[in-house]
C-alpha cells in the first residue's frame, strides 16, 4: 500500500471508530447500498430487492437493530440500479424518501412547457440508456415515491451533520452526502471505483459543470469515499488522482 492509505496510527483507529457508514453489497449486487448508523438510521440508494434483503440481514446479524429505526431513505440520483429497491424497502420500513430538488424543478419545467417525461429522461439519463423506452415510466414512478426534495448544502432532515452536496455531471440531479465531522463522503455515481480501484469522476458533455463538481468535492476534507459502484476508499486524499470520464 502507498503512503496515501491510512490504517495504522492511533488517530486512524479513532477515526475508524467514529465512522458511521456501512456498505451493504456483495458480488451479485448491481450497485452499493449504504447504511448510515446514526441514532436513527439512513439508507442511501436501496438498489435492488436483493440489496434490501441484504440490508435486513445486516441489521439483524451485525448491528442488532430493527427496520423501524430507519427514519430516512436518500437517493443520490434516480437511475433504476440505485432506486428499484425503494418499493420493497418501503413495504417493511415507513421512512420517507428524499432526492435532489433538481428533479422536481426539471419536471415542473417540462410540465410548464407541455413536454413529456421522455424529455425529462433525456436530461437525467446519459449515454445509450436514454434510448430505451422503459426508463421514462421508471422515472415517473420513482418521482412519485419521493417525499422530500433536497436543496444543495442543506442538512439532511433529522441528521444535520450530513450535508447535501450537489454534484451534477453523471446526471443533473446527482448529489453526494458529506459529514465534515467523520470526513465521510457518499458519492453515488458521481465517483465510482470499478476501474482497478482508481476513482473515476463520471461525466457528461458539459466539461465546465464537471470541472466545478470536481473542484467542490476536492475542497472537502474527505478520508472515506463511498462510491455507487466499486469498493470504498480509505485514504488521506482519495480525490487527488481522480480520472475524469468525458
Image (tube, rainbow, N blue to C red):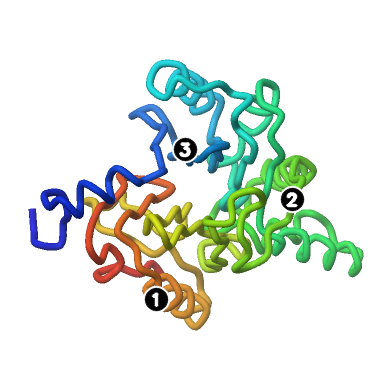
Q: Name the residue beneath numbered marker 2.
A: 148
Give the residue at x 60% y 32%.
70
Secondary element type, mark 2:
strand
Image height of 54 relative to 226, above or below: above
Find residue 24 and report its image quarter. Answer: top left
* C-alpha distance separating marks 3 and 1: 25 Å
SS at circle 1:
loop
Residue at 31% in and 47% down? 232
In the image, residue 90 above or below residue 163: above
* CA distance for labels 3 and 2: 20 Å
Viewer-closest of 243 and 225: 225
SS label for mark 3? loop
Instruction: Indicate left or right for 193 with 138 as reference.
Output: left
Quarter of the figure with the C terminus? bottom left
Mark 1 — residue? 219
Residue with the most extreme bottom position: 208
Label 3, on which residue? 37
Measured in 3D between alpha carbons, the distance from the residue under mark 1 to the one under mark 2, in whole angstroms, is 27 Å
Sort mark 2 into few (<14), some (14-19) or many (20+) by Cα contacts within 10 Å: some
* Labels 3, 2: front one: 3
Q: Nearer the N terminus, badge 3 or badge 1?
A: 3
Amino acid at each position: 500500500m502507498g503512503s496515501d492509505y491510512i490504517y495504522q496510527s492511533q488517530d486512524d483507529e479513532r477515526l475508524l471508530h467514529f465512522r458511521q457508514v456501512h456498505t451493504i453489497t456483495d458480488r451479485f449486487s448491481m450497485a452499493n447500498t449504504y447504511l448510515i448508523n446514526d441514532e436513527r438510521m439512513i439508507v442511501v440508494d436501496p438498489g435492488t430487492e436483493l440489496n434490501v434483503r441484504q440490508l435486513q440481514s445486516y441489521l439483524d446479524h451485525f448491528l442488532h437493530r430493527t427496520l423501524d429505526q430507519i427514519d430516512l431513505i436518500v437517493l443520490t440520483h434516480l437511475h433504476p440500479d440505485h432506486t428499484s429497491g425503494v418499493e420493497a424497502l418501503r413495504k417493511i420500513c415507513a421512512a420517507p424518501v428524499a432526492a435532489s430538488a433538481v428533479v422536481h424543478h426539471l419536471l415542473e419545467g417540462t410540465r410548464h412547457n407541455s413536454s413529456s417525461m421522455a424529455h425529462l429522461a433525456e436530461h437525467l439519463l446519459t449515454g445509450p440508456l436514454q434510448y430505451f423506452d422503459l426508463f421514462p415510466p421508471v422515472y415517473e414512478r420513482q418521482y412519485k415515491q419521493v417525499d422530500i426534495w433536497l436543496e444543495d448544502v442543506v442538512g439532511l432532515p433529522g441528521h444535520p451533520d450530513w450535508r447535501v452536496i450537489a454534484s451534477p455531471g453523471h446526471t443533473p440531479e446527482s448529489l453526494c452526502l458529506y459529514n465534515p465531522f467523520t470526513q465521510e463522503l457518499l458519492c453515488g455515481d458521481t465517483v465510482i471505483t470499478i476501474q482497478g480501484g482508481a476513482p473515476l469522476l463520471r461525466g457528461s458533455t458539459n466539461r465546465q459543470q464537471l470541472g466545478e463538481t470536481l473542484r467542490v468535492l476536492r475542497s472537502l476534507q474527505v478520508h472515506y469515499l463511498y462510491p455507487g459502484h466499486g469498493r470504498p476508499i480509505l485514504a488521506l486524499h482519495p480525490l487527488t488522482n481522480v480520472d475524469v470520464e468525458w
